Amino acid sequence: MQESVEALARVLESYRGRDKVIRAVCYSSQLIGGVLSRQADADVCSQQLGKRLLLLSAQLSQCRTVLRLFDDASMLVYSHNYGFGATDEDPLVRWLSILTNMADQLYYPCEHVAWAADAELIKVKSERWWLLSTVLWGTSLLLGILRSLRVLLLLRKKMKSCGTDRVGHSFQISRQVRGEFLSIISNAADLMNAVHWMPPGFLWAGQCPNWLVGLMGTISSLIGLMEISPNHSGQDDSTEINT
C-alpha cells in the first residue's frame, strides 16, 4: 500500500505525470457519470451522482486547458530538436513525424485563442478556433496512426531478418511492436472523440453519448499512464497533444 502511494506521489510530482492522472480521472468521471445519468431506472441519488461526476469531468477538462497554456515552449523545443529527423530514419516515418510536429505546434495557439475568447479576454468568436484546434488534433492523431503502422511494417521486416542467435534483439523488437500497437489503440480512441467534437453532419460528430466519450478517453488515458510507468519500454518521451 505504501509503495503504491509513493509511486503515485512520484507520478504527481511531474507535470506530465500529473496531467495524465488528471486526464484519467476526467474521462473516467465522464464514463461513470454518463452511465449513471443514462440509466432510466436509477434512483435519484445515482442520477445526481452522475450529474456531479459530469460536472467534475468538465472542471478537470477546463483545468487541463488552462495548464496547456504553458505547453508551447516545450513543444517548440521538441520540434526544434527533432528538426527534419535523422538521415538514417525511414523517409516516410520522418515526414509523418514532421507533419505531426507541425500539427501539434499549431494546435496550442489555436486552443489558446479559443480559450481566451470564451474567457472574454479577446473579442473573437471562439467556435472557429475550437474547430481549428480540433481539426489539428484529429490530424495529429491520424498522422500518428499512420506513423505507427509504418513503424510496425518496418519492425515486422526487421523481425523476419532477425536470426535465432539474437534472442535479445528479437525481444526488444517485440516490445517495440507492443508499444506501437498500444499507440494505435490510444490514437484511435482519441480520434473517435475528436470526430465527435466536429460540427454536426461530419461522420459521427455529436452522436456519441457521454459514457462512450468517457470510455474512449479512459482507454487512451490508461495507455498514457502505462507509458510513464517504470516498467514501460517506450521509444521516446515526445511532447504531444493530449486533450
Image: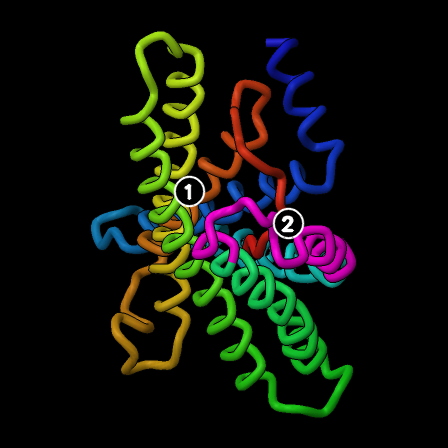
> Which quadrant of the structure image shows residue 126?
bottom right
Q: Which residues are magenta?
A: 72-94
- According to the image, label 2 marks what residue? 239
Q: Amino acid at mark 1?
A: Ser
Q: Quadrant of residue 213?
A: bottom left
Q: Name the amino acid, label 2.
A: Thr
Depth check: 67 or 239 in front? 239
| Farthest left residue in view | 41
Q: Is residue 78 magenta?
A: yes
Which residue has dot 1 on it? 183
| Badge 1: residue crowd in 10 Å (few <14, some 14–19, many ≥20) | many
Q: Work out whether 216 lies above or below 11.
A: below
Counting from the top left corner in percent of width and height, residue 166 is at 39, 12
Q: Residue at x 55, y 73 (%)?
A: 133
Q: Residue at x 59, y 37 (%)?
A: 236
Q: Nearer the viewer, residue 47 or 53?
A: 53
145 inside magenta stretch: no
Give the CA separation, mark 1 to mark 2: 14 Å
